[in-house]
Amino acid sequence: MFLRPLRFRDRRAWLKLREKNQNWFTEWEATIPNEFNEGKASFYQIVRNLSNEARTQRALPFVMTIDGQIAGQITVANINYGSTRSAYIGYWIGEEFAGKGYTPLAVAMAIDHCFQVLKLHRIEIAIRPENTKSLRVVEKLGLRQEGMRPKFLHINGDWRDHLIFAINDDELTESLVSKLKKS
């Protein structure tokens, strides 16, 4: 499994995976409230926006690839430097790849990159309490639960509560990938 930047030429494979898994994603994926009427962004708008964020070091959008096939996406977002040195991670994976250890590995790789290369101090992940598969990801990686943010993200037509998980760089004695491989 590899992480690499999302590119314009990924359009066909990315859209095919998204379309195939639309029902799988609907329950968990952030949406824009109807009152803002922004419509659905095109793939090119998504890549352009994420690329701009990456160029200014505010986000890192990656696709997860397995045997050369796009399996999902992981994005390090809201990267803050200065006194906080923190970021959020969000991710999705196609249903056919779920439950096989790819998502914990991708998240571990992204967190290791944030701590080792970007020299960030803290990473947060927000998960709906009902999302048992994502809860298992942060459990495998040893992120601590810090609390609940009521009505934190708009998902599937409503504002949803999210549990917040975090890890700080000084909590690790080895990379998360190494820790994951040992477990």
Image (cartoon, grey):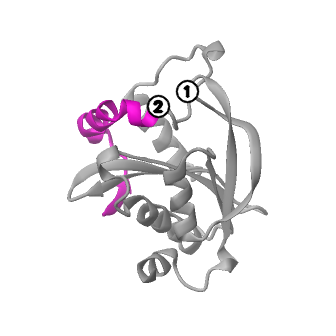
Label 2 close to label 1 by CB (< 8 Å): yes
Residue under numbered circle 1: 156
Residue at the image point whose x is 37% and y is 48% from the top: 72
Work out which quarter of the rendered image holds the N terminus and state it: bottom left
Residue at the image point whose x is 67% and y is 58% from the top: 165
User: Is disc 1 surrounded by few (<14), some (14 to 19) or many (20+) residues within 10 Å?
Assistant: some
Q: Please state which amino acid type lies under the numbered disc 2.
A: Thr
Q: Is residue 141 left or right of residue 42?
A: right
Q: Is residue 10 above or below residue 115?
A: above
Judging depth in this view, the residue of 56 and 128 nearest the camera is: 128
Q: Regarding mark 2 in the picture, which secondary structure is present there?
A: helix
Please tell me which of labels 2 and 1 falls first in the chain. Answer: 2
Q: Residue 126: percent from the left, percent from the top?
A: 63, 49
The image shows a total of numbered marks equal to 2
Q: Is residue 3 magenta?
A: yes
Q: Is residue 80 left or right of residue 102?
A: right
Residue under numbered circle 2: 26
Instruction: Place residue 171 in its image quadrant.
Output: bottom right
Q: Residue 43: percent from the left, percent from the top?
A: 37, 30
Q: Is residue 135 left or right of residue 180?
A: right
User: Is disc 2 surrounded by few (<14), some (14 to 19) or many (20+) residues within 10 Å?
Assistant: few
Q: Please state which amino acid type lies under the numbered disc 1.
A: Asn
Q: Is residue 102 magenta?
A: no
Q: How much space separates mark 2 and mark 1, taking CA atoms? A: 6 Å
Q: Residue 42: percent from the left, percent from the top?
A: 40, 25
The span shown in magenta is 1-26
